[in-house]
Image: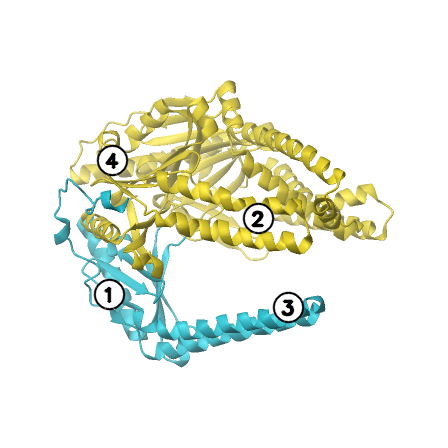
Amino acid sequence: METLSLNTPQRQSPKAILLILYKYLRIIVRQLWPILLIVLINPTSGKAIYVTVAVLVIVLVSLLYSLFAYSRFYYFIQQNELCVRSGVFRKTVINVPFDRIQSVDFKRNIAHQLLNVVSVQVDTAGTKGSELELDAIEFEKARELRDIVLAYKRAKTISAERHTGSTPPLPFIAEKPELILSLSAKDLMKVGMSENHLRTAGIIFAFFLGLADDIDQLLGWDVYGQLEHTTAAMSLVGILATIIAIPVFIIISFVITMIRTVLRYYGLKFWREGQRFKVVSGLLTRKEKTIQKSKIQVIRWVTSPLKRIFGIYQLNIYQAANFEQHLDKSLAIPGCYQQQVDETLDVVVPGFRRAIFDVHRMHPRIVIVMVFLFGFIPAVLFGLMAWYNHGLMQWLLVLVFPLTVLMGYLYQRKRRFKIHPDYILSEGGIFGNSNKLVEIFKVQRVHITSSPMQRWRGLSSLHIYTAGGEITFPYLQNTIAVQARDYILFRVERDHQPWM
Amino acid sequence: MSEDQPKELFTNSQVDLSRLPRAETLGIIGLEPTYKMVRYIHATLIGTVIIFFAFLFVMFEPQIRNVTLPVFLVIIILLVWNIFYHGISFPYMGYAIREKDITYQSGWLWKSMTTIPFNRVQHCDIKQGILDRQFGLARLTIYTAGGQHTEVLIPGLSPDTAEKLKTFILHGTEHSIENEL
């Protein structure tokens, strides 16, 4: 099966040099752009010269370093292991046995696409520091590498099955991909329009605050002072500014969300290939992610009021997460209709849609606690701030209190703990709806907590940990939480199905 | 509203829930008595560091001095309370081992109890901090798979007990793997 070409130690494609250059430039621009902007605006200031020189030195040093690193980086396959030799000052050798490889994913950003190379991400299950990333490999070689690993794993599974005698050995059939969802331009628009614009607004707001800080430090304009002055005074300018600023802000948020959506989800395709799910998406950076069906830990499908108008859901499939949290191993498939959600659920958890669940709700007392913590205390603090600053506009922030009353009420009304002998379903949502499904035998750990207030009412919180995330049910009846814990443990400890 | 809540987990139960092993009825084994001292020292050290930084902050930011006294009082009350809480909650900390899982509980006002089945343990390690070594103690950390919150830490064990627990847990893991095959 192994071909000669990958057996000898080899460097990455020479195009990697260009890519590394591109990567460094991007990092530098991203980190330093406010300073670079100042340099461009005001090139004569003394500060600007130092900054320019410093930036140039950093660019040069990192370029030399990366060239050197490239020439020292070798990868090859040896005895069913993927090996990487690298290191400029200290040599490191990493061997990853095929058995430990969970997935081989490809990623292509715009530079990769232009150069016809891919970045290969090799992921191993939860072993610290053993993830590998090959920055720039020729597409054919990457595919060959993946085929070798997959063929090895498939052969292994088949021989294991033959060993236990549970299933007759299957003849090797190339798994035909079955397209579940292909996001059309129209669907992409629907997804973009129904994304969470408030979150974007929050990001933009944080970004502008950060920018204000930079401007303040570099140019000496007191942006905060101006802002405070405007919001504090009951002047015509202040009110007008607010009235104009809000819609402008909303429009900007909307546009940015649309752009983000298109960049991330353009041309999204969601396939099933036998026992695997595969998602390819992205405009400039084309990402390809696969998840083995048996490795799925949690499935989540959510809808928001806007999404409900279009009848779409966002589907998330979580697998055993890695120690390295920045590696996002979940599949996100927005713009699914009910049919695609059902189709996926039927494949992953075949019995789920016919299952009859017992329903338990959170005690209404949770509303009081939530309103107190997230509504009352902030409202008092904002009120004090507004009173202290004589800020008329700042009094608006006190509206957080009635808002949390409404949200707490909706939360309690929708939150449900549903249990079936084989599954746990968490339902919730404030304005939208969210569902999370776990198979009980995949639970890793069960945790029960209680505060004095909860114990007084005979309540407690149940936390269920899986390898793909945590599910919490706050304010359950204590007897229910304890029974659920004992039942889950009973199932997990007697179930000998591999959870992964 | 709570009247119409079901009192049982399953209304149409396939297993008799009342006969399932209850994690609650376990004999909880307390931690080493010397660990109480470690907790006191720890809380005091943290308190001292916080007071020190608060003090530094006031030194360099003179304009907030008019609110310094009440703020300092509140901080000191909280820190003293924290030291006491570390002592009061000590007797509530402990672990219990069953045939197939380990349970760790802690907390006096805010109680928590966590259970890990042996067949979900990824690995265990034993650590000794500087204070631990002075008092002849060790900490056992048990890891399960996943991204966040994957470990449970049992402090205040004698190194001997920690080692025994580790062997037992890992043996339990192997045992369940054998059963799987």
Nearer to us: label 1 or label 4: 1
Q: Identify the mark at residue A158; answer none if there is no mark.
A: 4
Q: Which residue is mark 3?
A: B67
Neighbour class for label 3 at 10 Å: few (<14), some, many (≥20)? few
* Cα–Cα span, label 3 and label 1: 48 Å
Q: What colour has chain A?
A: yellow
Q: Chain of mark 4?
A: A
Q: Amino acid at mark 3?
A: Val
Q: Amino acid at mark 2?
A: Arg
Do callouts 3 and 1 mark residues in contact (Cβ within 8 Å)?
no
Circle 4 crowding by C-alpha within 10 Å: few under 14, some 14–19, many from 20: some
Residue B96, numbered label: 1
Q: Colour of chain B?
A: cyan
Q: How far apart are labels 4 and 3 at the CA level?
A: 72 Å
Disc 4 or disc 3, which is closer to the eye? 3
Bin the neighbour count of mark 1 within 10 Å (Cα to Cα): few under 14, some 14-19, many 20 and up.
Answer: some
Q: Position of residue A296 (x, y in %)?
A: 34, 39
* The C terminus of chain A lies in quadrant: top left
Question: Could you say where residue A269 lies in the image, as x and y percent from the top left?
Answer: 44, 25
